[in-house]
Image (cartoon, rainbow, N blue to C red):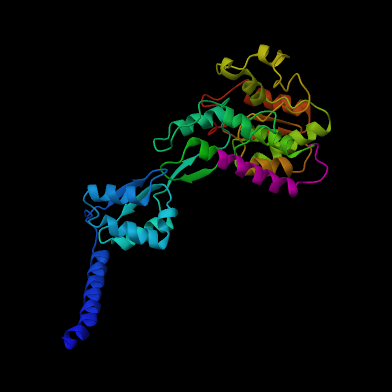
Amino acid sequence: MKRLLWLLPLLLIGALLLAGLELQRRWEQPLNIAARGVVFEVEQGDSLRRIAVRLAEEGILSEPQLLIAYGRYTGVDSRLKHGEYRLQPGTTAEGLLQLLERGEVIQYQVTLPEGLTLAQALALLAADPVLDQRLAAVDDERIAALTADYPGPEGLFLPETYRFARGDSDWDILQRAFAAMEAVLAEEWAVRAADLPLASPYEALILASIVERETGVPAERGEIAGVFIRRLHKNMRLQTDPTIIYGLGDAFDGDLRRSHLRDEANPYNTYRHGGLPPTPIALPGRAAIHAALNPAPGETLFFVARGDGSHEFSVTLEAHERAVRKYQLRRRADYRSNPGKP
């Protein structure tokens, strides 16, 4: 009897060791994943238990309770990141938990091209098949609240390529674009050239948006900015078509008429109103902002589009009028003022 009592602790320890080895074996067993891999989604608010049960129901995970227990022990269950995860053949329950802990979700991307208006950018985001759609239009109250420190929301979002996960929304992207624009504008304002006729970073943004819309050849950004800066210094009107077109909005049918140039009611008509327009007219990229704040030196005060994206720059009005007759009055069949811009 005494010998049996002495053996009981050993038997108990042995049983615990065997149970532990069995748990380890089950933990290290590969999940049931097809050769092409499996993609599953963690939605906003999903718990580890919900994920484990769903994977078990799909026949991928055979030990959901084990995953839940390990997740609680390691704290992963409180650090889940939403998005899509890709499981490869050979992945174990431990590997799944590590994937969830690292938040290695499948990444998508969307590009906001330079020179878009905010309305065009929102339409592009709305067309993305993965992004959740939260915003109704430019006048959405969330956009108004985000940009409340400015006269309006136009131009305040950096055109860039943004990576995101499934479950992210157009609103998420727009908030990131706003923060990125504020950061870029602050950085570029800090290294601006001296004696610019620009009173604030916002005025620089307005000018940058005009430079962006006028630029068809990237190498010309600095020279185009230089023309506008010199005109502002001399109190000359900017006389740039893209501002008028922006002010016309949906009324613009693709044909800029003399009546449009004479219209004083359009606050964006830089042929009739001096200085900068009230707001930006597009989303300028960093290069355009840098050009507006660091314009190329020179004496040119005029430019006209050649029709291939480049421009003819002139110092005098007489030279400019000759260039206009050459490139505008006898336009080539494939004429475009700034190819590549929306």
Where residue 157 appears, as percent x and y from the top left, is: 60, 37
How many numbered circles does the render carry? 0
Task: Between residue 139 and residue 123, name the one nearer to us.
Answer: 139
**Residue 33 image point, x, y percent:** 23, 55
Position of residue 74 in the picture relative to residue 12 (left or right) = right
Left or right of residue 167: residue 291: right
Residue with the most extreme top position: 259
Viewer-side residue, 325 vs 150: 150
Quick check: is 22 in the magenta stretch?
no
335 sits left or right of 129 in the view? right
| Start-end of magenta stretch | 175-198
- Quarter where residue 225 is shown: top right
Q: Is residue 306 visible to us here?
A: no
The residue drawn where x is 52% and y is 24% is 333
**Residue at horizontal 24 percent and vertical 81 percent from the top:** 9
Q: What secondary structure characterizes most of the magenta part?
A: helix
> Could you tell me if residue 147 is visible in this image?
yes
Q: Is residue 293 above or below residue 23?
A: above
Is residue 16 positioned above or below 156 on the image? below
Residue at left offset 42%, top offset 41%: 167
Task: Identify which residue, 19 or 61, lies in the foreground.
Answer: 19
Quarter of the image that includes the N terminus: bottom left
How far across and down, in percent of the image, does residue 2 sit?
19, 87
Q: Residue at x 63, y 44 (%)?
A: 286
From the viewer's perspective, is 135 left or right of 63?
A: right
Quadrant location of residue 116?
Answer: top right
In the depicted view, which residue is nearer to us: 57 or 200? 57
- Verify whether residue 182 appears in magenta: yes
